[in-house]
Image (tube, rainbow, N blue to C red):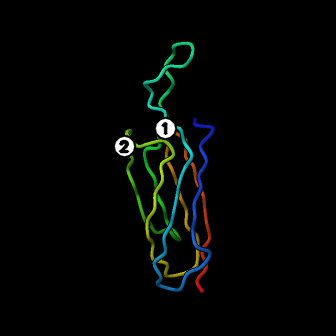
Amino acid sequence: MADDAKPRVKVPKSAAAGEVVTIKALISHKMESGQRKDADGKLIPRSIINRFTCDLNGVNVVDVAIDPAVSTNPYFEFDAKVDAAGEFKFTWYDDDGSVYEDVKPIAVA
């Protein structure tokens, strides 16, 4: 498990009904390929974020499959239409079985 993985997201605090807002999501994650060796010569287990999703009030906004060639600390920026107040739920899936989540509220002004 990537103990150092830490999600960070930026969501506007509010939006007008029907407004399209820009969402920014990053996870601090070393993205270990499984091909490097530690100081003792043992392979470091693979630990790569392989999927990222974002839902707004339970409705999927974005679902991204991530290839192993992605860089450390994957960053996503995307737009989402906000029809009602609620919560954005962000989920990152690590191929070591770990799941990282963050939730951010948004109000409709």
**28 w.r.t. 32: above or below:** below
Task: Answer few, some or many: residues within 10 Å of disc 1's Cα (few below 14, many 20 plus, some between 14 and 19).
Answer: many
Mark identifier at residue 31: 1
Q: Earlier in the sequence, mark 2 or mark 1?
A: 1
**107 w.r.t. 69: above or below:** below
Mark identifier at residue 67: 2
Q: Position of residue 74 (x, y in %)?
A: 48, 48
Q: Residue drawn 46% across and 62% down?
A: 77
**Which is more toward the observer, 48 or 55?**
48
Q: Amino acid at mark 1?
A: Met
Give the side of residue 66 with respect to residue 47, left or right.
Answer: left
Mark 1, secondary structure of its residue: loop
Q: How many marks?
A: 2
Marks 2 and 1, how far apart in space?
Answer: 11 Å
Mark 2, secondary structure of its residue: loop
Q: Residue drawn 49% across and 65% down?
A: 55
**Which is more toward the observer, 10 or 45?**
10
Q: Residue drawn 60% across and 86% down?
A: 109
**Which is more toward the observer, 75 or 108?**
75
Q: Residue drawn 46% across and 84% down?
A: 18
